[in-house]
Image: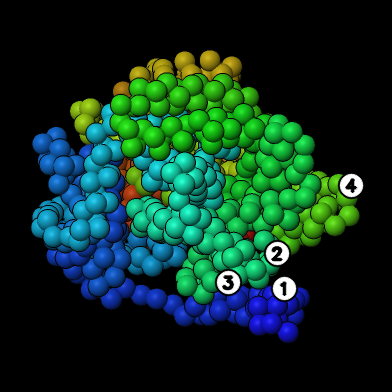
Amino acid sequence: MPFLQRLKIILQSKKFIGISLCLAIIYILIFTKIITYESKLAINTTELTGSIISYTIDGNKLSMIIKAKEKVKVTYYIKTEEEKEYLQNNILIGEKIILKGSLSKPYQNTILNTFNYQKYLYNNKIYTTFSANEIMLTGKTSLLNRVKSSLMRKIDKMGSSKAYLYALILGEVDYIENDVYQNYQKNGTTHLFAVSGMHISTLVLFLTTILKKIHLKEGISNCIIITFLFFYMFLIGFTPSVLRGTLLFIFLLINRKLKINLNTINVLYLLFLLLILINPFYIYHLGFIYSFATSFGLILFSKKIKGNYFMKLIKISSIAFLFSFPITIYNFYEINLLTIINNIIIVPLVTIFIFPLALLTFILPFLSPLLNIGTIILESISQLLSLIEINLIIPKINFIFIIIYYIGVYLIYKKNLKYITLLIILIVSYKIFPYLNPNAYIYFLDVGQGDSTVIVGNHLSYAVLIDTGGKITYEQEAWEKKNKTYNISDNTITFLKSIGVTKLDYLITTHGDYDHLGEAKNLLNKFKVEKIILNNDTLNDLEIELVELAKEKKIKILKNIKELNLGTNKLSFLNYKLYDNENDNSNVMYLNMNDLKVLFMGDAGIEVEKEILEKYNLPNMDILKVGHHGSKTSTSSDLIDKINPKYSIISVGRNNRYGHPNMEVLENLKNTTIYRTDQNGSIMFKINKDKLKIELCPP
């Protein structure tokens, strides 16, 4: 039997697939879980020299990954507009750069089920971050890197076309305006801006058409295409999804030319094994997982993709949705059920018109106005589609869900569509799981130098958020403003979805300071809130903005509340007297939750504490939410002696400029168990009828 024939039989045999898959899993576990990796750099490093792997300039922020002894993530804040212009015109990929600043280890997520930055960097073989205060460019780099840098500068000079040229050609979405990109996220179409197999296929088709026009032989054409694809991979940084797309094209070409005649799905599997062998950490790369899952699905169901162009598009979009569903839910806890329809509308526009036009504009810059018209149409359609959402929120799933889900998908493929019922039952089961949970919870969230507390009733009977946190922002010049903005409450929203909360019954604000209320507008714009409770003081500017937004969204505003019934529990408001400052007018609340007694002090000071002690006969507290982040203006010894808290929670930012918490306050609390968000991250109290369990999410 010929060698290639024997090879085909081996590679397609179930025994080979089973053994190789088991070995691949063992290989991944050994090199990503059992073996651990640490930085070779001393933590006290203040000067760093390395070569630039990649960089972006967004507003006044320069972000880089450099290769020193190892890869390091670098952040530098640009000081002047002139310096920004200098960097844009002179910084080079591969260039040797000298940095002065401070090295640190990246923090992991301190709010449960949110993005773990430390883990993300670790999976990309980055173990430290460097905050630079001085940088020096040397201009030393290779010819190939100079070509890459000049191409990036060419895009930089494209004006309003710049954002989409970066996104569609280089896969860099930081230049797309935040609101516009959020619409793409809502519609489930951001995959169009992650350079992947779709882009590779379009490029191959584009190049094949041109090379056929000039009558080149197929062999020469294929060599030119492969050479171009490798250069393109170098240009965008050898991302896993592009590696998959390019190597699949090459593997299929070899398969056809050598007449091995392997099934396409087996070729894809061999490519998967190769890439995992090269870098086992690819298995944690979201683009890699999406790329292989959807490609596998489309190849598996390829014989069912029949009909006219429109019918094929519906089937392709449906299959991609079916195979990517658990990946999306696992990572984001939510999916827009209209994603299939949105992709049917937007994908043809991008693949047939926008992406090819972006390629032509890159080659022929005078076409930039035409690309602008196309992207304006794209954004307008995306905005219209984002107005209608049918979002399905599913709490954190596990691998049992994923295994059963794909078994169901396999049964649909092997048997018939009726097995979709299995998937629906599975999804509904996980959806209703939180409503079967008899425990109640209080989560003190780490939102930096601010306050935010989530209260969830047993059987998910209610959800309350006390304060949102917020970071004070200062007026910036136009050149300093970033396209991508970070909202602390985005993590809060992600967390709420991950525990099955689909709406807040109440958003309670203790008072109108930015570190307590600053994220309220973002929260209202992205999450459903039934009612808002304000303190009794007159409204400040921030509260006025919140009230106006609430009216637009028809959210009821409440003031002068004395008591809330939360299921069988009660939340009492204790502070009615008006003082001459915002902090002392904080809502002070007492919660009796399944016999667990909790006192929330907001930012109320010692004078308010005295007033409350005189007015109410407060019991001993299980939990004290310490006032004003542990400032010396709150938490008097008189209060502590009276309520005798078992646990004290201080919500405070790491290395904050206020010196919180104050040593005198810590002394007053010495007989309690103190938890601090700067040291312990978010703090969860799980409340059963006769048990209390505490879990931390440290940085």
Res. 577 in view? no
Are the residues tagged 2 and 3 within 8 Å (C-beta)?
no
- Residue 371 spot, x, y in % from top left: 40, 27
Are the residues tagged 4 and 1 within 8 Å (C-beta)?
no
Marks 4/1: CA–CA distance: 29 Å
Image position of 296 (left or right of 238): right
Tell me the mark number nearer the camera, choosing from 4 and 1: 1
Residue 273 is labelled as 3
Tell me the mark number nearer the camera, choosing from 2 and 3: 2
Decide: few, some or many residues near mark 1? Use Cα within 10 Å; few <14, some 14-19, many ≥20. some
Q: Which residue is mark 1?
A: 12
Compare residues 109 and 124 and report the one nearer the observer.
Answer: 124
Marks 2/4: CA–CA distance: 27 Å
Q: Please identify the quarter of the rendering in which residue 308 is found.
A: top right
Residue 263 is labelled as 2
Q: Amino acid at mark 4?
A: Lys
Marks 2/3: CA–CA distance: 16 Å
Marks 3/1: CA–CA distance: 14 Å
Q: Amino acid at mark 2?
A: Asn
Compare residues 55 and 475 and report the one nearer the observer.
Answer: 55
10 over 323 or under it: above or below:
below
Res. 350 in view? yes
Number of numbered labels in the structure image: 4
Q: Quadrant of the N terminus?
A: bottom right
Q: Please identify the quarter of the rendering in which residue 264 is found.
A: bottom right
Q: Earlier in the sequence, mark 4 or mark 1?
A: 1
Regarding mark 4 in the picture, which secondary structure is present there? helix
